[in-house]
Image: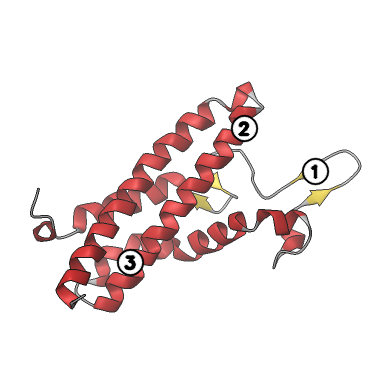
């Protein structure tokens, strides 16, 4: 594939995954509103939160590709790049949750606290922060900023 085609596909991926983040933040907020019902609603919330991390990591992948192609000003990516480390780390942690529960994860000691009364994992369900690190609203604002900054000439159908 020639470089111009790669640029088009990269911008399409940036647009796709930034839009997915905005959609997924709405889904997380809806699921959070159902948490008081317990049970399956807590599990649905955890799934939606993980899907948000997947979308965010995919956007980071496309940002990396677009930066390699060196056709957009890095200013376009500034807000998302500030969140990069948390996105990459939280996505990896969530992908390997079973290993963490088994005590095999890279930072297993930070994942689970247990005593005779309670087991607590690294998935707090308070506020809009994921694992008390990545704020969903900040992520949505960064994705929206990126969408607004993308060059429209890559989207001939719009």
Residue in the picture at 37% in, 59% down:
59
Asked if residue 102 lies left or right of residue 134, the reply is: right
Q: Quadrant of residue 94?
A: bottom right
Asked if residue 147 lies left or right of residue 155, the reply is: right
- Image height check: is 32 above or below 70? above
**What kind of element bears circle 3?**
helix
Residue 63 percent location from the top left of the image = 33, 66
User: Tags 3 and 1 in contact by the CB under 8 Å rule?
Assistant: no
Residue 15 percent location from the top left of the image = 26, 54
Residue in the picture at 88% in, 38% down:
117
Crowd tier of the residue under label 2, counting other residues whose Cα lies within 10 Å: few below 14, some 14–19, many 20 or above: some
Q: Quadrant of residue 58?
A: bottom left
Q: Who comes first in sequence, dot 1 or dot 2?
A: 2
Q: Residue furthest top?
A: 37
Asked if residue 22 lies left or right of residue 49, the reply is: left
* Camera-side mark, 1 or 2: 2
The N terminus appears in which quarter of the rendering?
bottom left
Front residue of 101/120: it is 101
Disc 1 from disc 2: Cα separation: 16 Å
Residue 13 percent location from the top left of the image = 28, 59
- Image height check: is 72 above or below 24? below
**What kind of element bears circle 2?**
helix
Disc 3 from disc 1: Cα separation: 37 Å
Residue 49 percent location from the top left of the image = 52, 43
- What mark, if any, has residue 24 been given in the picture? none
Disc 2 from disc 3: Cα separation: 32 Å
State how the image is colored.
Answer: secondary structure
**What kind of element bears circle 1?**
strand
- What mark, if any, has residue 119 been given in the picture? 1
Q: Which residue is mark 2?
A: 42
Q: Which residue is mark 3?
A: 63
């Amino acid at each position: 594939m020639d470089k111009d085609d790669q640029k088009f596909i990269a911008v399409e991926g940036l647009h796709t995954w930034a839009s997915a983040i905005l959609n997924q933040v709405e889904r997380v907020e809806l699921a959070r509103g159902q948490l008081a019902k317990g049970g399956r609603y807590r599990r649905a919330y955890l799934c939606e939160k993980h899907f948000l991390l997947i979308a965010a990591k995919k956007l980071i992948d496309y940002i990396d590709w677009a930066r390699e192609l060196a056709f957009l000003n890095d200013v376009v990516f500034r807000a998302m790049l500030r969140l990069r480390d948390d996105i990459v780390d939280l996505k990896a942690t969530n992908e390997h949750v079973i290993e963490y529960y088994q005590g095999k994860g890279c930072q297993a000691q930070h994942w689970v606290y247990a005593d005779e009364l309670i087991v607590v994992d690294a998935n707090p369900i308070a506020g809009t922060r994921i694992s008390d690190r990545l704020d969903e609203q900040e992520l949505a604002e960064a994705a929206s900023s990126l969408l607004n900054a993308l060059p429209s000439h890559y989207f001939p159908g719009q």
